[in-house]
Image (tube, grey):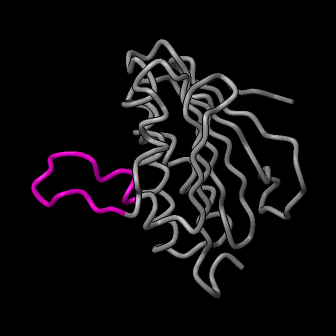
């Protein structure tokens, strides 16, 4: 497997898995190791959005997946790490013709992951709250949303978003 190192310690590598026809030889799945610095959230989102556009996904679905990825990765950095860039968040992305699944694992050095697992993501935050909308928004955008303690002790979130009918084909 070839891993491409990006500046700041970020890395991108294909993931071995079931083959799905992708345009231009793109991998059906890939892994990104993103430093725990919020500056890496946008590049991770843009990479995923570009892959979905190449796959033929519609603009609304690409935007929704981009927002979903932003929320999950940003939460992993802000709440699951020291947030100083010295650790890595692992993102595994599985792309299908009509769905994308993201697995995001934080290093576990931030808040207790049990807090995120115990929180009800269907409960909207108070309107006057300055923060706390991430899990609620993730739950609304995802067609699947699972939370568990990862093998490294941090939080592992798996989200899946299906393209709207007729898109992604």
Q: Residue at x 75, y 27 (%)?
A: 3
Quarter placement of the C terminus = bottom right
Left or right, 28 with respect to 65, comes to right
Quarter placement of the N terminus = top right
Q: Residue 133: x percent and y percent?
A: 29, 53
Q: Quarter of the image holding residue 85?
A: top left
Residue 87 magenta-drawn?
A: no
Q: Residue at x 63, y 34 (%)?
A: 32
Residue sitting farthest toward the left = 128
Say which of 87 and 108 sits in front: 108
Q: Is residue 26 above or below residue 79?
A: below
Range shown magenta? 123-137
Residue 126 magenta-drawn?
A: yes
Main SS category, magenta section? loop
Residue sitting farthest toward the top = 86
Residue sitting farthest toward the front = 118
Q: Quarter of the image holding residue 148?
A: top right
Q: Residue 104: x percent and y percent?
A: 59, 40
Q: Residue 145: x percent and y percent?
A: 56, 57
Q: Quarter of the image holding residue 24?
A: bottom right
Q: Is residue 153 above or below residue 53?
A: above
Q: Residue 15: x percent and y percent?
A: 80, 40
Left or right, 35 with respect to 102, comes to left
Say which of 149 and 18 sits in front: 149
Q: Is residue 167 above or below residue 1?
A: below
């Amino acid at each position: 497997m070839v891993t491409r190192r990006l500046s700041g310690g970020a890395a991108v590598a294909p993931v071995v898995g079931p083959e799905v026809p992708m345009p231009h030889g793109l991998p059906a799945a890939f892994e990104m190791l993103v430093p725990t610095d919020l500056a890496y959230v946008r590049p991770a989102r843009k990479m995923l959005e570009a892959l979905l556009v190449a796959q033929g996904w519609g603009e609304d679905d690409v935007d929704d997946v981009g927002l979903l990825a932003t929320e999950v990765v940003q939460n992993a950095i802000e709440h699951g790490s020291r947030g100083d860039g010295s650790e890595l968040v692992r993102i595994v992305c599985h792309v299908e013709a009509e769905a994308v699944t993201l697995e995001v694992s934080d290093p576990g050095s931030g808040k207790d992951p049990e807090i995120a697992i115990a929180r009800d993501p269907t409960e909207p935050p108070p309107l006057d709250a300055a923060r706390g909308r991430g899990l609620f928004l993730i739950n609304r955008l995802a067609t699947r949303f699972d939370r568990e303690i990862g093998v490294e002790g941090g939080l592992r979130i798996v989200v899946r978003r299906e393209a709207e009918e007729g898109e992604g084909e």
